[in-house]
Structure formats: C-alpha cells, structure tokens
Image (cartoon, rainbow, N blue to C red):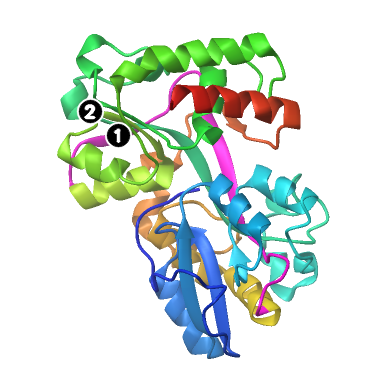
C-alpha cells in the first residue's frame, strides 16, 4: 500500500545519520503516515520520529537487502512479509504477546503471512483497482476491459502503476488466470494484454494519479481505495473508485521491525502504540483506509463509515496477492521489463 507524497521529516541516508537514543526511524509508503498520530506518539513517549519513504514493495526489499539502512519500522504488504521473513530481513518482535495485540480483530490475528504473530503489527488494509473521472469518461466503469482494452477516446488518458505487483494480478483477474502462475502461456497472455494497452497509457507511475485525475491528465488510473477517497475529497471533482465485475486485488500492510534496527525497543513501543484503537483511528483518518483494530470506529471520521471506496459490493470478488514462487516471479519480472523497454 498506498501511498502519497508527504513526509513529516523527509530524510535520506538514515544509515549515515547521527543516531541518538530516543529516536525511531520509519520507512513507509509515501504519504502513508498520520502526522497527528506521530505527534501523539512523540508526546507520549518522548521519542523523536524520522520518516523516509518508498513507492513500491520492491524498493523496500532492495533497500533492506543492501543492508545498513538504520530503519526501525518498515511497512510491507502481506506477500512481501513472507518474502522478507524468508530472506531473513525481519526481526522477531513477539507482537502476538504484546498487551495491545488483544485489540486485533480475530480474523486478522495470526494471518497466513505471519501465522505465529512473531513479526508484525497490522497497519492498514484495503483494495487496489482503478479510479476514474466519471464526468470526463461519461459513463460508469464496470469492467476491467475498459482499463486493459479501452475505447479509442482514452488513448493517452490512462495511468498504470509503476510496479507490476497489483496491476499484474488485475490482468490475471480479467483474463481469468491464477495468481502466481508458472505457465509461460499465461505470461504471454498477460504480456499481450499489457502491450495492447500501452498506446493508451500516459504514464506508468504509482505516485501522482490523484493530481493527474484532478487535472484531467488521466481519465482512468490505477489507484488504491483510500487514496482514491483522498482524491475525491481533496479535489472536489467527480472521481469514482471502480469495482469492476471481475474483481479487485486485496492488500494488507503491516508494521514490522527489520533485522539490524538501531532502536528495536522503541520500535516495539511503536507496534504496541498502533494497536490501540484511539491511535490507529488517527492513522485511518489520515490514510482513509480500513484497519484491523476492534474499537477504533469511535475514533474515526464519520465519513469513513459511509464511504463508497471502503464498501466492496457483495458481487465483486476480492483476491489477495501472495508471495509467488521464484519461477512465477521471474515470468512477472520478464513481462514487466519487456513492457517498459
């Protein structure tokens, strides 16, 4: 997830920055950390928080594999939690034994990607789909066909995620292919779909879709549900988050402590902090996504409860991404690399 362009403290080179006791270095998606929540954490604990940002799970993985980051908290999506654990890049925190873990909704306790609740605390969850300017499009968007095989009027008006992670799975939904397929024929079908869409794409970018939708540079754009809500509310334009009949891709982001964290005790305090209803409620108010903490609703803005972006129609499937085998990931990478050449 998920994923905007703001940081409380825009930091670079945390690995070389002076380290002082009483700090916490967070590496999170762009504009995905509530300033109000961080201010509350700093006031209650006396810990100074620094924030650096990334725009894809792949960027996070590469940074952690390079080592020496100085980060104390990272926020990977569910399938990348599995990858980071297998790579030995996440530290065990015993989050399931923390006093506030009891606040986690039962359906999100000990999830498939952290079955013993050893590593991560829940952050935010939602869906990835497409948003569009209904006033400029002129009708309701009901199928992924309109995104992948658009009408001629949409040439140069479609924005696609920079990373293949979720858009590749959207293609699988449209083509009725399994996620993480190791079939070369399935990969060829996705490649052909992407190549056919390419003349209609104005940019492959995961960061500025809200601005582009607001100013009309893009009429249809890959987006996340909460980010799309931000676009609608901030721009006051007719931006609609679509629930195509073929389905949407589910995601679940978690806050984890990387191996080599400089402030592991402070990181654990932060994990306990975000599992309190009043604190994660502030985060949901800012990011406009759902959270996994029971009792957070009274601390959330009323407009979240009735927002169309957070209500998946019963007829629309939600399929969560998962960690793919090396063979399947190689096919995905090959397709995406060829597309962007």
Q: Is residue 40 above or below residue 300?
A: below
In the rendered image, the vertical position of residue 230 relative to residue 67, given as above or below = above
- The quadrant the C terminus occupies is top left
Left-right relation of 32 to 216: right
Residue 35 located left or right of residue 155 = right
* Residue at 45% over, 69% down: 12
Location of residue 265 in the rendering, given as x and y in whole percent from the top left corner: 70, 81
Q: Between disc 1 and disc 2, whose residue precedes?
A: 2
As helix, strand or loop, the secondary structure at mark 1 comes to strand
Residue 237 is covered by the magenta coloring:
yes
Span of residues in magenta: 236-263
Say which of 100 and 235 sits in front: 235
User: Mark 1 — residue?
Assistant: 240
Cα separation between marks 1 and 2:
6 Å
Q: Give the answer, above or below, for where 97 lies relative to 311.
A: below
Q: Residue 108: percent from the left, percent from the top?
A: 69, 51
Q: Position of residue 312 (x, y in %)?
A: 48, 34
Residue 134 — which label?
Answer: 2
The tally of labels here is 2
Question: Is residue 183 or residue 251 the one in the foreground?
Answer: 183
Where disc 2 sits, the SS reads helix
Q: Residue at x 24, y 25 (%)?
A: 157
Q: Tell me what residue is drawn at x 43 percent, y 80 percent.
A: 39
Q: Residues within 10 Å of mark 2 (few under 14, many from 20)?
A: some
User: Residue 159: within the magenta?
Assistant: no
Relative to 248, is 137 on the left or the right?
left
Viewer can see residue 83: yes
| Crowdedness near tag 1: few (<14), some (14–19) or many (≥20) residues, C-alpha within 10 Å | many
Q: Is residue 314 visible?
A: no
């Amino acid at each position: 997830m998920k994923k905007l362009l703001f940081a409380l403290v825009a930091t670079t080179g945390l690995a070389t920055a002076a380290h002082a006791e009483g700090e916490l270095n967070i590496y999170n998606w762009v504009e995905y950390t509530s300033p109000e929540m961080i201010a509350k954490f700093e006031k209650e604990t006396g810990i100074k928080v620094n924030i650096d940002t990334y725009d894809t799970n792949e960027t996070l993985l590469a940074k952690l594999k390079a080592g020496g980051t100085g980060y104390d908290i990272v926020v990977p999506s569910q399938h990348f939690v599995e990858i980071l654990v297998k790579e030995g890049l996440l530290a065990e925190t015993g989050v399931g034994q923390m006093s506030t873990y009891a606040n986690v909704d039962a359906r999100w306790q000990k999830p498939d990607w952290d079955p013993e609740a050893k590593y991560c605390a829940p952050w935010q969850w939602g869906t990835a789909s497409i948003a569009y300017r209904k006033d400029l499009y002129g009708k309701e968007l009901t199928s992924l066909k309109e995104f992948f095989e658009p009408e001629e009027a949409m040439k140069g008006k479609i924005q696609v995620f920079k990373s293949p992670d979720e858009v590749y799975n959207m293609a699988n939904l449209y083509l009725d292919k399994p996620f993480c397929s190791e079939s070369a024929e399935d990969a060829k079908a996705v490649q052909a779909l992407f190549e056919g869409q390419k003349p209609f794409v104005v940019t492959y970018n995961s960061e500025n879709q809200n601005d582009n939708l607001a100013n009309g540079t893009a009429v249809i754009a890959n987006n996340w549900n909460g980010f799309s809500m931000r676009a609608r509310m901030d721009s006051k334009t007719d931006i609609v988050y679509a629930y195509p009949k073929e389905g949407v891709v589910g995601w679940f982001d978690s806050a984890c402590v990387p191996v080599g964290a400089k402030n592991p005790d402070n990181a654990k305090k932060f994990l306990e902090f975000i599992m309190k209803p009043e604190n994660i409620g502030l985060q949901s108010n800012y990011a406009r996504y759902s959270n996994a903490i029971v009792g957070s609703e009274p601390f959330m803005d009323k407009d979240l409860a009735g927002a169309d972006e957070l209500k998946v129609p019963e007829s629309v499937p939600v399929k969560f991404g998962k960690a793919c085998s090396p063979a399947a990931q190689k096919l995905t990478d090959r397709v995406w690399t060829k597309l962007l050449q």
